[in-house]
Amino acid sequence: MKIIKKLSSLLVLTTFLVATESSAQSKKFDGFSVAVGASTVGTRNGLSVTDTSANVNASLDLGKTDATFTGEVGYTWPLQNSFAVELGLNADQNNTINAGRFAEGGVSVNFTAGSHYSIYIKPMYKINDSSSLFFKLGSHSVKGKTTIKEGTVNASAEGTYTGTGYGAGIKSYLNNNVFIQAELTITDYNKKTFVSGDTTTTYQPNSTAGTILIGYQF
């Protein structure tokens, strides 16, 4: 009788542990998550300037690579056949990163970017219980500022650029809750035009960002 009681207790304990582990396992790719990390951002900015009074029509391509801290919050829904989908918000640290620079003949042009946000959808394919490959589609917004210097004369133009980002990467869990994520995202921003007197300046930025995040799944 004692043996039966012990076996019954062991069976109950084993069932409880299995159920607990199963519940913990189900947290992967399921529910609310937060993540923080860093991005290396390479930016290209097509710049064209037209000045009708001076008969000037010029174009150049500004380019620069810089780094920033980033973070995101998301919610993941598990789907059938090893698929899941995540919706979320990503934001970079509200600082100013160098996004393009040009200097020639005493004239310098600098383009900086800050306050970058994106709303994204991320379909995922689970390659095993702990890792998934994903595609990321996002709507991006970034504040851009261009400063032109010639001698003691400074001029600047600011605007908010919107665009579409396409990314891909891998998300892997280190345990039932902690995960690490690596991704590459390419973002094409809409063209923006500034008019001042006889001068029309047009900017066409795009960026490529490599990001590493570490996060927690609740």
Image (spheres, rainbow, N blue to C red):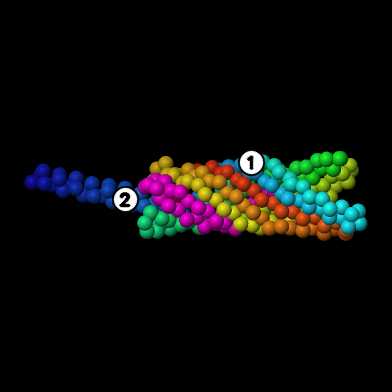
Q: Nearer the viewer, residue 204 or 34?
A: 204
Q: Write the start and end of the magenta stretch as one range.
A: 113-139
Q: Is residue 113 left or right of residue 52?
A: left
Secondary-structure class at tag 1? strand
Total labels drawn: 2
Q: Which residue is mark 2?
A: 22
Is residue 120 rendered magenta in the image?
Answer: yes
Between 34 and 158, the one nearer to me in the picture: 158
Residue 201 can be seen in this image: yes
Q: Does residue 39 appear left or right of residue 61 in this picture?
A: left
Mark 2: secondary structure: helix
- Taking the spot 48% from the left edge, 43% from the top edge, the residue there is 180
> What amino acid type is highlighted by mark number 1?
Ala
Residue 51: quarter of image: bottom right
1 vs 2, front mark: 1
Label the magenta part by its dominant secondary structure. strand
Label whose residue precedes the other's in the sequence (1 or 2): 2
- Amino acid under disc 2: Ser
Separation of marks 1 and 2 at Cα, in angstroms:
40 Å
Q: Nearer the viewer, residue 13 or 58?
A: 58
Estimate the x, y position of residue 43 in percent, counting from the top left: 67, 46
Percent position of residue 217, x then y: 44, 49
- Label 1: few (<14), some or many (≥20) within 10 Å? some
Q: Position of residue 149 (x, y in %)?
A: 84, 45
**Pointer 1: what residue?**
67
Residue occupying the point 55% across, 56% down: 137
Disc number placed over residue 135 in the picture, else none: none
